Image: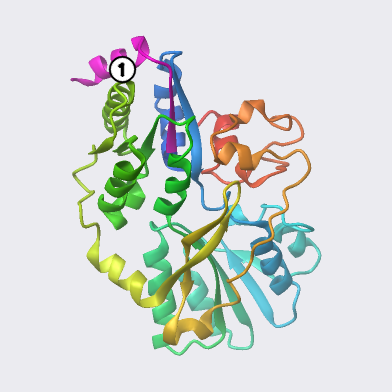
């Protein structure tokens, strides 16, 4: 079907009510910006998932970074959206206001360059992300090792998406999944095939442009309405069954799997990536950061698991705005609350 026909199909759909989860934060944003979310039939409910790495990071991780920032001889470097995420006591921005050494980067390679120039300071890089960015971090760890940059450390909050989706797929209130296209470029389609096979639910790998989104969402609605499980790859131009072998090999060389805490989902076995082997001395203490205390009234955990839409949170747009965020979902550009507040 052409784009107009796909859009019409989604707008006039009158089959069984469907609750579909778009796992990726970039999908959430693209669905708003393209106007696709606004034309959907009332019988189609889209739920945002845990595909925002900053949002699913527990407060213990932020607290660890804050502790480094307030320690003499250390400096913390992070992407800008992490600076405003509340910890149990302070955010990184708050730590900086109190004299802590904190800066942001646009590209984590900047951290390597800064550490190489200033050997008197230990730089702690905040490595947050999913499979999409894990190869980048693996490469930086290797380079720090190969170039003998001994005054750099990595505090990792790197997670793998299939394990989280496996938990969500057991939830009876979700009828199907729009799978994260960027993650699938790295992992390939195989992990999602196994998820679809074990859960019996439809899963569609989709791209991010309006035509690709229309195609993927229409496929998902069609198969979910038939209650037909399986995997469909509607992003075949870049997603292959085997993924990106070079990126996967690099990840396997530098990282090992371990348990990780996800906000809203708790501890998920084997869903974390931790620096290992000969590179392990470059880790800044990333394991066992399990405490996750959300601010009073914050509903991020419910939003991240599709149990609440942002507008139903009592803090949304009142106590919690992008300028004064209560929770991480309002901070990150990939957070469902921030995207909903800004309308994309």
How many residues crowd around disc 1 within 10 Å: few (fewer than 14), some, or many (20 or more)? many
**In this rendering, is residue 295 above or below 22?**
below
Question: Which of 226/49 is in front?
Answer: 226
What is the quadrant of residue 100 in the picture? bottom right
In the rendered view, does 313 fall on the left or right side of 106? right
Residue 157 spot, x, y in % from top left: 54, 63
Residue 24 spot, x, y in % from top left: 43, 42
Question: Which of 199/311 is in front?
Answer: 199
In the rendered view, does 6 fall on the left or right side of 341? left
**In this rendering, is residue 152 above or below 321?**
below
In the rendered view, does 137 fall on the left or right side of 97? left
Question: Which of 341/16 is in front?
Answer: 16
Residue 308 spot, x, y in % from top left: 60, 31
Residue at x 74%, y 64% (from the top left corner): 96
Is residue 12 within the magenta segment?
yes
Q: Is residue 60 visible?
A: yes
Residue at x 57%, y 85% (from the top left corner): 151
Determine which residue is flagged by label 1: 7
Q: What segment is highlighted magenta in the picture?
A: 1-22
What colour scheme has been applied to the protein in the rendered image? Answer: rainbow
Which quadrant of the figure contains the N terminus? top left
Q: Secondary structure at mark 1?
A: helix
How many labels, in total?
1
Residue 344 spot, x, y in % from top left: 50, 32
In the rendered view, does 227 fall on the left or right side of 341? left
Q: Is residue 24 visible?
A: no
Is residue 334 within the magenta segment?
no
**In this rendering, is residue 143 above or below 138?**
below
């Amino acid at each position: 079907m052409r784009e107009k026909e796909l859009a019409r199909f989604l707008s006039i759909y009158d089959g069984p009510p469907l609750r579909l989860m778009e796992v990726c934060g970039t999908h959430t944003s693209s669905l708003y910006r393209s106007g696709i979310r606004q034309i959907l039939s009332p019988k189609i409910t889209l739920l945002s998932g845990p595909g925002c790495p900053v949002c699913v990071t527990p407060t213990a991780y932020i607290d660890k970074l804050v502790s480094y920032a307030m320690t003499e001889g250390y400096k913390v470097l992070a992407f800008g959206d992490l600076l405003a995420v509340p910890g149990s006591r302070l955010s990184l921005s708050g730590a900086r206001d109190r004299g802590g050494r904190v800066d942001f980067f646009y590209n984590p390679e900047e951290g390597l360059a800064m550490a190489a120039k200033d050997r008197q300071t230990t730089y702690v890089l905040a490595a947050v992300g999913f499979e999409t960015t894990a190869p980048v971090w693996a490469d930086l760890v290797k380079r720090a090792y190969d170039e003998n940059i001994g005054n750099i450390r990595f505090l990792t909050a790197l997670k793998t998406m299939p394990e989280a989706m496996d938990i969500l797929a057991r939830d009876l209130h979700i009828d199907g999944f729009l799978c994260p296209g960027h993650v699938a470029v790295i992992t390939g389609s195989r992990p999602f095939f196994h998820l679809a096979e074990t859960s019996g639910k439809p899963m569609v790998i989709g791209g991010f442009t309006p035509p690709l989104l229309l195609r993927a969402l229409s496929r998902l609605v069609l198969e979910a309405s038939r209650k037909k499980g399986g995997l469909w790859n509607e992003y075949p131009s870049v997603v292959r069954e085997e993924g990106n072998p070079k990126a996967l090999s690099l990840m396997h060389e530098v990282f090992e799997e371990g348990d990780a805490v996800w906000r809203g989902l708790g501890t998920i076995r084997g869903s974390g990536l931790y620096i290992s082997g000969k590179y392990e001395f470059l880790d800044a203490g990333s394991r066992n950061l399990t405490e996750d205390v959300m601010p009073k009234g914050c509903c991020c955990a419910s939003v991240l698991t599709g149990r609440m839409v942002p507008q139903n949170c009592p803090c949304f747009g009142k106590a919690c705005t992008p300028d004064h965020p209560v929770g991480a979902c309002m901070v990150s550009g990939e957070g469902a609350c921030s995207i909903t507040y800004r309308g994309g």
